[in-house]
Amino acid sequence: MLSGRSLLTYTVVSFSVLFFLFSASASAQDEDMTALFEQGKDAFNRGEYDAALQAFQALLAENPSDETVFYFWEEAGHKIFLDMLIREGEFETVARRFIEKARVGRKMKEEDGSRIEALTEQIVSGDHRQRREALLELESNHGEYAVEYLYKELGNQDTEARVNVIAALSRLGEEATLPLVQVLNADDELIVQNAAVVLGRIRDGRAVPALAKLYASDETSEIVKSIAAEAIEKIAGKSADDLDDPSALFGTMAEAYVGGCPATCKPFLKSAVIWTWDGELKKVPAVPGLRSLELAEDACYAALECDAGDTKAVMLLGLVYAAQLAEIHNMEIDEDDEGANFAAESIAKANAILALCGPDRLREAFAMALEKGLFLTAIEVIDVLEEIGAFDRNSLLLAYDSGDKLVKYRAAFAAVQNGIVDDEVVWITGKALRESSIQQVLVVDDNSETRNAMLAGLNANGFFAVGASTGADGLVRAKEFPPKDLVVIRSGLEDLTIDSIIYELDSGPGSETPVLLMAANNEMEGIKGLWEGKVAGFVSDSEVASDAYLAVARDSAGDLNDARQKALALSAKAAETLASLDGSALGSVEEDLIQALDKPDEVKVPVLNALAKIGSRTALEAVAQVFGDTAASSEVRIAAAKALGAIYATGEAAPDGEVMAALQEALAGEDAGLRLAAAEAVGKSVDMESAALKEILLSNRIQ
């Protein structure tokens, strides 16, 4: 939870800007939102707290802009929302949503070097009024970019100038944290100690690992150690000597970044850069969508700098790069775009680092990815483990326990390629083969009973469903599976409001994802009143208990085209995997293979190859039908002929007149490959001393 002090730090804006924001809002919707805000404010001031909560929820449901919320935040004089924070429950959740949107409501900060330099000069040497005006402009317009110019003045020999700059940087708040963390690497001791002072005032937990590293270093002077220790105690609430070692602290921060922890990732603090130190403070553009993972990567390397033998840091580095791969593979990149080169280079780099991490650390990264619900990340790790021949049975068992079908399927494929073949692996691969449409559903519900019931029902009825018990976890999982076919959200989550989840989804690659809202029976009327027409539908707890929600889910999940393409790719991989096995292992999935003969060629061909290895009469009718389809591709008919030959070779069956006619027609055709396959099938089906063979040979005599 944000302190009152830090909240107030972010609420400064000029009256003219506020007036512009408000006066520009002249539409009917804006008038409705203003009315709701006034209604909520008045109700709260009268002590009618439930009525106030309903009004503020209705206001958020109207999707007000961040700038509008910022205006409301200012207009309320902060106190109402601070009081709501203290009341906890849904009051706290709604208040935090207002606070986050208000903070984001400030415009994206601008990098204007000449202007920032002029403002810095005013802060260093101007009078009280000039300093105040400069600070307001830096805070409102430039944010973190101001640190690049202000930090050098932390070493100013003029005490008053230093004090002014310390005050200015402190007022920038959490936006200044990451660049100031890099400033701790400066050679100028006065700059370092004053940067530590500012970080202690800001009280952002992201500074603790770097301060701990500074405190633990033998090269740090006693005065700087003392200041770093004081800053740590202010931020962490404990002595620097009671902290974990710096390497472990950096690792914990990396884990939080890769897991999407809001307290670490600060999604409401917009930024487009990563700060570094190279003799001076520098910035590089962050990759859109990857900034948190880039920060996680930096934290892992910082951990290794503190302790080169930190195996957990190596494991986390593997996790981070696998997460980056998952993100890159889900980006929409035009092959002619510059992004295509970036993606190729990033993928090559990530794969190399993953291989360097080694089998043991990768298996640990796989386990952590599953623990955090980062299933696409886990699949990326499986790919590498399979490639280096290190996917083991323990990893397979972890995949089975994950509850995610995609992970199970991918693990089964890897197990086969790494020589782990048992009945369970074959059975799961057979299930993957028969998938016809993978519609992915995310259920965000803090009620474990209804969440588990819905997941069980969805997964039993052709969906791929995963669950999340908090809104924050739900957003992470939504990001892991773009694009979702459907998201179900429980009303009244403790950590995030409905609108915060919906509008966060709208801002990403899943912007077209339909949403169902779930609520207790006695809450449904109120929820519909707020969200009717804004979401795809509603589900009550009683509908979950009776499976009545399944029809709603099917109606809401949208176009199946993308789902079918995913299923097709999955089926093709499953078919290839089964075709690589010995026929003796395939008996349990023969029916799955036969049923898959109605799929496209990329599935049908390996399926026929697998059926050829089984050589069972059970598949004869289906295989003969495929071969007899003269409109089928040559590749498919060749595979079917070989499967027929394998079945005939067992002596349990012989071609009937219709099949034999089709084989003879193929023998007389112009397709050399098909002629050979048909000849093999006939040769395996006809007795060497029979008159039938003589007739066939004579009819195919080369003139």
Image (cartoon, rainbow, N blue to C red):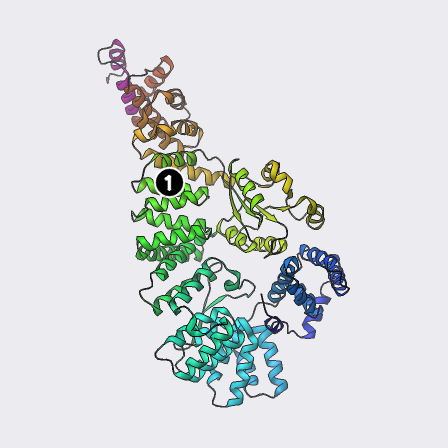
Name the element at disc 1: helix
> Does 299 appear above or below 120?
above
Q: Quadrant of residue 121?
A: bottom right
Question: Quarter holding the N terminus?
Answer: bottom right
Mark 1 is surrounded, within 10 Å at the Cα level, by few (under 14), some (14 to 19) or many (20 or more) other residues, namely: many
Q: Quadrant of residue 313?
A: bottom left
Query: Which amino acid, mark 1?
Result: Ala
Residue named by callout 1 = 412
Q: Residue at x 42, y 56 (%)?
A: 324
> Does 328 appear above or below 22?
above
Considering every residue shown, the one lying at the far left of the view is: 689
**Magenta region's main secondary structure?**
helix
Question: Quarter holding the C terminus?
Answer: top left
- Could you tell whether 581 is left or right of 285 in the image? left
Res 670 visible? no
Percent of width and height locating residue 174: 53, 71
Magenta includes 81?
no
Residue closer to the observer: 662 or 373: 373
Q: Residue at x 35, y 69 (%)?
A: 306
> Does 172 appear above or below 322?
below
Percent of width and height locating residue 463: 52, 39
Percent of width and height locating residue 107: 60, 67
- Could you tell whether 356 is left or right of 20 in the image? left
Residue closer to the observer: 242 or 587: 242
Considering every residue shown, the one lying at the far bottom of the view is: 158
Q: Residue at x 33, y 25 (%)?
A: 643
Considering every residue shown, the one lying at the far top of the view is: 691
Q: Quadrant of residue 17?
A: bottom right
Percent of width and height locating residue 641: 33, 24
Res 605 visible? yes
Residue interval drawn in magenta? 675-703
Q: Please tell me how many numbered marks the rendered image carries.
A: 1
